[in-house]
Image: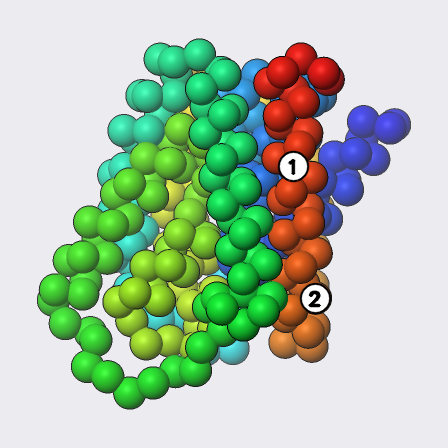
Amino acid sequence: MPLLLLLILIGISVGALTGITGSSGVLIVVPALSLMGLTFQDSVGTSLLVDVITTSTVIYVYFRNKNIAIAPALIMGLGALLGTQIGIRIAISVSETPLEIAFSILTMALAVQMFRRARGHGINIKEKKSADNTRSHFLLAFLLSIPVGILTGTLGTSGGIMFIGILMLLFSLSAQKMVGTATLAMIFSALSGSAGYIIVGRISLLDAAIIGSISLISGYFFSTTANKIRESLVYEAIGSIFVIVVIVEIMKITGFV
């Protein structure tokens, strides 16, 4: 029963994270499942399948509110899909410790970005007029999404925050539309990654089903109410969670837990 309750709490947290920020649930799912006894690779594979389930309802909400730019999302998704298969080959051929160290560094970087966004230095920009839907922008978006996919395959990061970074660089979209677009792109990398991990047998289908079913509901709720929450408080809270995740990962790597 305590295990089931923990999986439910993880699902609620993942839905909140994805629904509000468009981020992957990896930063919650991987450390939690690792502490519960799964290997890092199995935790990554399970997290990717959870992302597939969660993003489906979040995409629906953002699409219903016309906050998705279809073309950039498809281009980034295709690039990430390719990169993910490369990343999986890397992940299953190396030991856990380097992957966990890389995961901790990435998590800390994302924590810093969350605190920056809380202070108005992140993606919270107004939509501006510019001719950015050129072939060069789409080509660059595709190329930049390949390394995002590689990170998906190795660390389980479906790329929500990184896709937002690409959109900030190349396209003029509002904050909400960037979140919706990044979430649609993310489902491509998550699908590719989870399929790859299922093929190599590095995934816990039961854990993914329990967490995913809860995050499906949670993601719908938090994505529909995202506009009513003061963003700065949300980003500060998520940033704090990420810092805690880094501390736990460091303790796990050094043998304290």
Residue 63 showing in the rendered view: no
Tell me the residue that label 1 is attached to: 245
- The answer to whether any part of residue 26 appears in the image is yes
Decide: few, some or many residues near mark 2? Use Cα within 10 Å; few <14, some 14-19, many ≥20: few
Q: Is residue 121 above or below residue 14?
A: below
| Total numbered labels | 2
Q: Nearer the viewer, residue 32 or 190?
A: 32
Badge 1: how crowded within 10 Å, few (<14), some, or many (20+)?
A: many
Badge 2 or badge 1: first in the primary sequence: 2
Q: Give the left or right position of residue 117, taking residue 68 as reference.
A: right
Q: Is residue 58 above or below residue 26?
A: below
Q: Which residue is mark 2?
A: 233
Q: Which of the 4 quarters of the picture holds residue 255? A: top right
Give the amino acid at mark 1. Val
At x 68% / y 29%, what residue is drawn?
A: 248
Kind of element beneath mark 1: helix
Which residue is at 51% across, 24% downward? 100
Q: Position of residue 138 (x, y in %)?
A: 19, 62
* Residue 70, quarter of the rendered image: bottom left
Q: Find the distance from the CA under tag 2 to the CA under tag 1.
A: 19 Å
